[in-house]
Image (tube, helix red, strand yellow):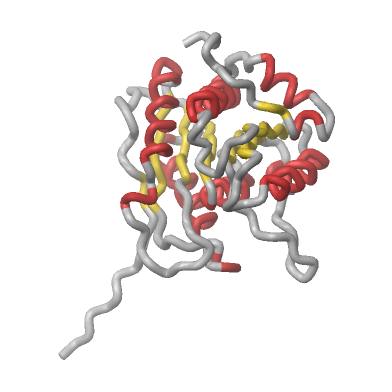
Amino acid sequence: MAQQATPVRTARLGRALGPEPTAVSGVVLLLPGGEESSGRRPSPLMANASVRALGRRLARAGREDGLATHVVHYRYRGWNGAEAHLARDADWATEEVVRRYGDVAVCLAGVDMGARAALHAGGHEAVNSVLAIAPWLPEEDVAAPPEPVKQLAGRRVLMVHGTNDARTDPELSFRLAARAKKANRDVCRFEVHSDGHALRQHRDEVHALAEDFVMGSLFGRAFSRPVEDALAAPPPLGLRMPLAAGFGRSLRR
């Protein structure tokens, strides 16, 4: 009896969140969190409600500009060491965007381990910006190579991290941002004081900040004053910018 071949796992893009514009001129790829090591298939719950809520908000904000937003569905739950499966899937997803939509600007927007994937895959020529929310980063090890940053040159990069994050040390994202800033002046980082890894206490402010950054990066809209100041400020000021309570309430819709 012939053996059946094991099906090859493939990443895929979810359906566009919200009404897909007739003419797409920019794309946000949403990269959910994951695990450090796992060969299991991702659960649909990995694309959690927070990621989808952010995607729907961005889709509404960018509808008139031709924005499409898609969640990336990974092949595996885990990063899996040197395999870096989530980063490879982010790179594949960017290639798929180019295949579908042509020459459009792409923002990689990741959460947790998905934020690490966004940072790693940010060197793709179609990517013009990277949004890393509560990025999961490995503990620094002198025997291991540091997280790469050179691929971020020429991209706008914004990181957001809660100061009470118990899952991934916010100091690790600060150090990564500081190294990236040396190679690329368009890097900034916001701190959400007293908030944890999921950033639940100030989710509205975080999503407003994400909207401000993405619309400015993809479509040339004016950044809010805090984002302008954070991008322009030398380190460490622009890398420890506090996210004010109520941010976004006065921004134009």
Q: Position of residue 97 (x, y in %)?
A: 44, 41
Q: Is residue 201 above or below residue 115?
A: above
Q: Is residue 42 above or below residue 158?
A: below
Q: Nearer the viewer, residue 76 or 99?
A: 76
Outermost residue on the front side: it is 194
Residue 169: image location, x then y, percent: 66, 50
Q: Position of residue 246 (x, y in %)?
A: 56, 17
User: Is residue 55 in sight in this rendering?
Assistant: yes
- Measured along the vertical axis of the image, is residue 129 above or below residue 31? above
Nearest to the observer: residue 71 or residue 93: 71
**Number of numbered discs on residues:** 0
State the residue lying farthest toward the bottom. Answer: 1
Q: Relative to residue 60, is residue 246 drawn left or right? A: right
Residue drawn at 76 percent across, 47 percent down: 175
Residue under the point 72% across and 34% down: 187
**Quadrant of image for the N terminus:** bottom left
> 23 or 57: nearer the eye?
57
Picture residue at 44% right of the left edge, 21% below the top: 62
Image location of residue 141, percent across then percent down:
75, 65
Give the quarter of the image for residue 84.
bottom right
Q: Residue at x 33, y 56 (%)?
A: 43
Residue at the left extreme? Answer: 1
